[in-house]
């Protein structure tokens, strides 16, 4: 990049603050959460091209050009070590790469995720089911080469378009999800002046094959820990939130970080409802809640469209939450949900956004809620992208 990471971060913080403008006064920004400069990405999304015996793993264009990124130093070491092994396996199993210009071949992408323990989930994105048998036959050999392989699957993506994965997933291993054991750092100073009491804590998340996970594990840990600490520190001294909703909850990172933080010393802990559109992710979140010993009547996950929820009219969902967490895709929460949150009596919202442009638009739609704290998380170093967490109070 020609620019040291701390300097990049200073520039990014300035650009994000400018983008959010008056919605986020200078004084409420907390120091940004830095990333390691290298080896931070827990996921590799490699287009596969070339020949089976000499595959190119990385970028491929529609004219047949390709760039091999298997030694890209952004990936965590477990992925860097696995990619050459997987390249060799592609040749041995005869998985002919898909050629975009000629529309021939089968193997389109290789999607590799590494857990913090170094275990791997490897997904072969194929044009059809034709070579699934070869993958099955080669699995024992692959496991010999990659003993950390926990989950392997074939994903079928039949469309000739730049779409990463398809709807059909054929899991080839006994395990169908990767256990991401995060370690959340202990509590930081509270805005209300008092110290926060949280100790470092493990957060184990089951990650099914077709579910979203934050790509930078260490920065995700800082993000969830910050949300946990802010949730425990209410502006009016009313104590920690008791009833929370986590919308766009994915595999439940925020919900489980918040649910597990309280409940010590005989306290039963807050009730948490997570809502997510992907049923696979909801299955993962439920499994993680069970693993953490959280009772299902207190910590619930439901499949559904978060954009149509109305916090003030959800009696069957346990009544008005006193804290709402939203972590939408890049398009933001949108006009309707923002309008319903604005009109509800929800006192506090934690909004985690990967797109400051849509965050600014959504904040303007909720004028009754003011930003009390904000923090930038350098989830995507060496890019202009930023993750931002803001706390809104009514
Ligand atoms: C940025 S991810 C956040 C996931 C999670 N909060 C986390 O920390 O990993 C956004 C999530 O929103 C989900 N999603 C997209 N549209 C949705 C909708 N209309 N209703 C509920 N969830 C949705 C996606 O499947 C994805 O899991």
Image: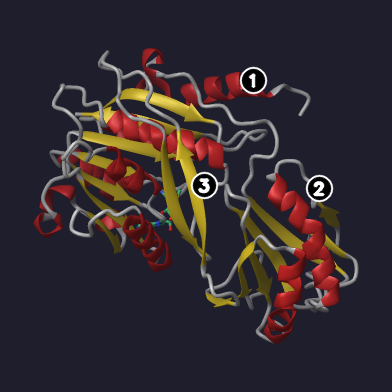
Name the quadrant containing residue 263: top left
1 or 3: tag closer to the N-terminus: 1
Relative to residue 238, is residue 75 depicted above or below? below
Q: Is residue 222 above or below residue 132?
A: above
Instruction: Give the percent coordinates (x, y) of residue 291.
Output: 36, 57
Q: Is mark 1 within 8 Å of ligand 1?
A: no
Q: Is residue 4 left or right of residue 230?
A: right
Compared with 389, 73 (above or below) is below
Instruction: Find numbered disc 2 in the image and state the secondary structure of the residue it sits on.
Output: loop
Front residue of this view, candidates 333 and 108: 108
Classify mark 1: residues with Cα within 10 Å, few (<14), some (14-19) or many (20+).
Answer: few
- CA separation in Å, label 2 and label 1: 24 Å
User: Which residue bears the numbered disc 1?
Assistant: 6
Quarter occupied by residue 198: top left
Instruction: Using a 10 Å C-alpha cutoff, classify the residue at mark 3 as few (fewer than 14 neighbours), some (14 to 19) or many (20 or more).
Output: some
Labelled disc at residue 71 = 2
| Whether residue 355 is visible | no
Residue, disc 3:
214
Render colour scheme: secondary structure
């Amino acid at each position: 990049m020609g620019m040291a990471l701390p300097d990049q971060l200073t520039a990014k913080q300035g650009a994000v603050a400018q983008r959010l403008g008056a919605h986020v006064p200078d004084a409420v920004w907390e120091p940004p959460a830095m990333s390691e400069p290298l080896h931070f990405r827990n996921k590799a999304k490699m287009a596969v091209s070339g020949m089976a015996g000499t595959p190119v793993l990385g970028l491929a264009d529609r004219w047949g050009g390709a760039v091999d990124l298997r030694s890209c130093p952004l990936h965590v070491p477990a992925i860097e070590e696995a990619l050459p092994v997987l390249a060799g396996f592609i040749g041995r199993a005869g998985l002919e790469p898909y050629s975009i210009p000629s529309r021939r071949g089968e193997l389109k992408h290789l999607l590799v995720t590494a857990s913090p323990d170094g275990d791997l989930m490897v997904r072969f994105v194929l044009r059809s089911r034709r070579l699934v048998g070869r993958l099955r036959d080669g699995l024992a050999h692959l496991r010999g080469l990659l003993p950390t392989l926990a989950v392997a699957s074939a994903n079928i993506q039949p469309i000739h378009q730049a779409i990463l994965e398809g709807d059909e997933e054929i899991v080839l291993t006994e395990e169908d999800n990767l256990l991401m054991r995060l370690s959340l750092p202990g509590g930081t100073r509270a805005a209300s002046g008092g110290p926060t009491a949280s100790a470092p804590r493990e957060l184990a998340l089951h990650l099914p094959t077709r579910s979203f996970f934050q790509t930078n594990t260490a920065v995700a840990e800082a993000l969830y820990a910050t949300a946990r600490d802010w949730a425990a520190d209410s502006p009016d001294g009313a104590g920690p939130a008791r009833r929370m909703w986590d919308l766009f909850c994915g595999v439940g990172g925020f919900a489980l970080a918040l649910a597990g933080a309280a409940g010590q010393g005989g306290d039963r802990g807050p009730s948490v409802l997570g809502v997510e559109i992907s049923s696979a992710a909801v299955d993962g979140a439920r499994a993680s809640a069970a693993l953490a010993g959280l009772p299902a009547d207190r910590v619930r996950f439901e499949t559904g469209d978060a954009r149509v929820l109305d916090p003030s009219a959800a009696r069957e969902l346990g009544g008005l939450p006193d804290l709402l967490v939203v972590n939408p895709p890049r398009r933001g929460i949108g006009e309707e949900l923002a309008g319903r949150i604005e009109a509800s009596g929800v006192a506090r919202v934690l909004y985690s956004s990967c797109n400051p442009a849509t965050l600014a638009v959504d904040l303007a739609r909720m004028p009754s809620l003011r930003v009390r704290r904000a923090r930038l998380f350098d989830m995507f170093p060496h890019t202009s992208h930023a993750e931002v967490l803001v706390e809104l109070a009514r």
